[in-house]
Image (cartoon, rainbow, N blue to C red):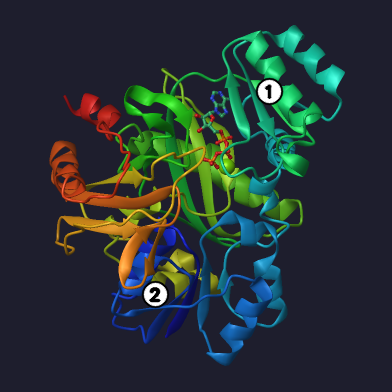
Amino acid sequence: MKILVVGSGGREHAIAWKLVQSERIQTVFVAPGNGGTALHPHLKTIPLSNPHALAEFAIQEKIDITVVGPEVPLAAGIVNIFRAKELKIFGPTKEAAQLESSKDFAKAFMQRHAIPTAEYQTFSDLSAAHAYIDLKGAPIVIKADGLAAGKGVVVAMSLDEAHGAVDMMLSDNSLGDAGARVVIEEFLAGEEASFIVMVDGKNILPLATSQDHKRLLDDDLGPNTGGMGAYSPAPIVTPQLHARVMREIIQPTVQGMAKDGIVFTGFLYAGLMIDDQGNPKTLEFNCRMGDPETQPIMARLKTDLVTVMEHAVNGTLDTIELEWDRRTAMGVVMAAAGYPDAPRKGDVISGIPAETTDCITFHAGTTVLDGRLITNGGRVLCVVGLGDTVKLAQKNAYETVEKIHFDGAQYRRDIGWRALNKKH
Ligand SMILES: Nc1ncnc2c1ncn2[C@@H]1O[C@H](COP(=O)(O)OP(=O)(O)OP(=O)(O)O)[C@@H](O)[C@H]1O
Ligand SMILES: [Mg+2]
């Protein structure tokens, strides 16, 4: 089998790393990939990212299956382009990807299908948005409708902050078209979890649960980021809660999309807020796997991923079960100086140890220049430790993090704190 993985982040490195372990694989291509995929002896990194060029490549190379990592090509219709050429690809069509690419679409969809989520209204008119904020009071959440690379959500604790956020999006156009409409929604309190499943159009196969750390600094302080670390499993998602999320959120979403005439295929990620009574609500949908959640999830997956992908594109996900490493996997992100606002590139990276059975380093913003590995983006690496306890997984990850060096490296020292608190 030949498989093409589209994307350049830690998520795509982890997916490719897992695929290439299969005995059924001939070649795994990663486009455009990163320093980690380029240095991997059995991965082929190719400098393509345009969806039309990728489809041509897939035809020439006789690629069996293409797997898409990030949301941008999905929202641009890469799945539509591939399917028009009868190429097998795992991901949602442009229409289905609206669950992520338009917050207004997702909210209206959830309301229509009685899927639990925060109360909301959508605005493009500035004064109506301000009036709604005054009516509802703070805390309140302002979200740009479109894709904004993690910068489109303001959780406003005060009225001033809320008014400032709509001004920034609707009047200053700071987020361009993505912020030309805003969803204003009720603030939900609780603990978050990431619930990711694979959907083949009809059947749903849940992946292991996980939890991400959005804020830059320890104790969940500092600005929001793409994610500074994640671990799997998430102890807050008990078997009972898991069943409830499937019944109340995931199944109605897949069935609701089909009823609305948009068949969903691909990874479906529900961002959940679980209140102190244990009730889940949907904060958002993503139509792809999370980054960094993918890294610990792939580190725990024991089933052959090539076979899983084959079932996913053939509509037979009901015929397989996934087997997971029972250990906890904990991923710690090492980010560049200046991240998230203005990450610095070009710092030399040293000290990454070889992979072991209890620690793997996935690359994200790295590249190889003149034979040297250098930083090339905001989130540089994700070091995943595995261990029989949360504490041991954490120890294994941080022991490796401390061996790795690049100037200005930033990382949190408390990844996994919620899971640790639950275990003691
Ligand atoms: N209604 C809400 N109440 C409280 N916090 C919220 C609410 N909606 C969003 N948040 C917080 O803001 C974060 C980002 O929101 P959301 O997931 O909708 O945005 P996003 O930019 O699509 O995120 P991602 O990059 O994970 O896809 C959430 O992870 C959560 O911490
Ligand atoms: Mg999102």
How far is mark 1 from mark 2, CA to CA?
44 Å
- Quarter of the image for residue 249 reads top right
Q: Nearer the viewer, residue 341 or 198?
A: 341
Residue visible at 18% across and 43% down in the picture: 398
| Residue 264 visible in image | no
Indicate whether 260 appears above or below 370: above
- Crowding at dot 1, Cα within 10 Å, few <14 / some 14-19 / many 20+, comes out as many
* Mark carried by residue 165: 1
How many numbered discs?
2
Mark 2 element type: helix
Q: Nearer the viewer, residue 16 or 341?
A: 341
Q: Nearer the viewer, residue 187 or 70?
A: 70
- Pinpoint residue 317: horizontal percent, then vertical percent: 47, 66
Residue at numbered disc 2: 306
- Quarter of the image for residue 212 reads top left
- Quarter of the image for residue 12 reads bottom left
Indicate whether 38 appears above or below 422: below
Q: Nearer the viewer, residue 135 or 281?
A: 135
